Amino acid sequence: MKKTTRFVIWICSKFTRKEIEQIIQGLIEVLTNRNPEVKPKDDFKEKHPNYRNFFVDPEPPLKAPPQKAPKLNWKELLSNYQKEKGHPLLPVNNKDPETKAPKGSLCRVCGAKAEYLYFNDGKKRSQLKCKVCSSLSQVHPRHRNKARYFCPHCGHSLYLWKERKDVSIYKCDNDKCSHFLANKAKLNFAEKLLTKVKSSQFKLRYQYRDYHFTQDQLRHSAPEEKDVSCLFKIHNS
């Protein structure tokens, strides 16, 4: 038995003929758009269950890769050194000013300050060595493929996915991104099978749209007002 047939039987068992006529009249008003407060259910999603709605990620992208927290603690390393050697580890004695690290420099591995760092590549002055943990780091590290944007969830560089006249779309392709894994976990069994055939039906990865116009270009230009002052100069002949 169809759903509508069962509903008709239920209505006939609950309402009188006059009440049913009033219900029909109310439904006609809805179908003819004479009742703006009541709208019929949209069956678009039922006809197209796998249609992907347009959705924009609210988080803006990063314009530089996030700084990773030091893996080691330079203060603990200095404390352990003093316990083992019996004397503290002294800062770098920079006799040559060219090997002195810039002020504010920090070791990317342990976080040691500039007095424990020195240039290890002579006149190039591009590679710093840490006296505390003996690690090497670049003064100006090159960003991955000179990327413009980075994912706010995992810090991975975004690649140019689509290029159009008015917009460039950047996308994160990191399979370990927390945003991607969270969206993937929300899929049911049927949707996971569909992703293997039509992966474009689901928006799982972080995307950023870079539009090629400004807010001033979007402003509505009002029509030029005509000069009506000349109308007052018209006299009846």
Image (cartoon, helix red, strand yellow):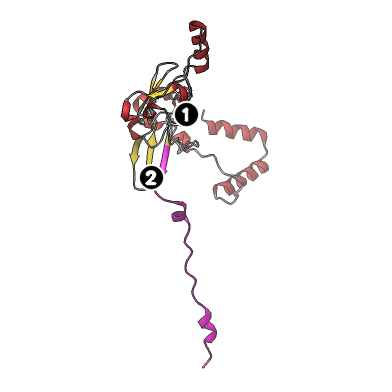
Q: Amino acid at mark 2?
A: Val
- Whether residue 179 is in magenta: the answer is no
- Residue 83 x/y as whole percent: 52, 7
Q: Which residue is mark 1?
A: 153
Residue matched to label 2: 167
Asked if the stretch drawn in magenta spans residue 226, the answer is yes
Gap between marks 1 and 2 measured at Cα: 22 Å
Q: Give above or below for 20 relative to 213.
A: above
* Mark count: 2
Let me know if residue 187 appears in the view: no
What residue is drawn where x is 58% and y is 47%? 30
Who's the residue at 35% across and 24% down the image? 196
Q: Which residues are magenta?
A: 208-237
For marks 1 and 2 on the same chain, the one whose residue lies earlier in the sequence: 1
Q: Please, what is the three-letter code of the amino acid marked with disc 1?
A: His
Location of residue 164 with respect to 177 vertically, above or below: below
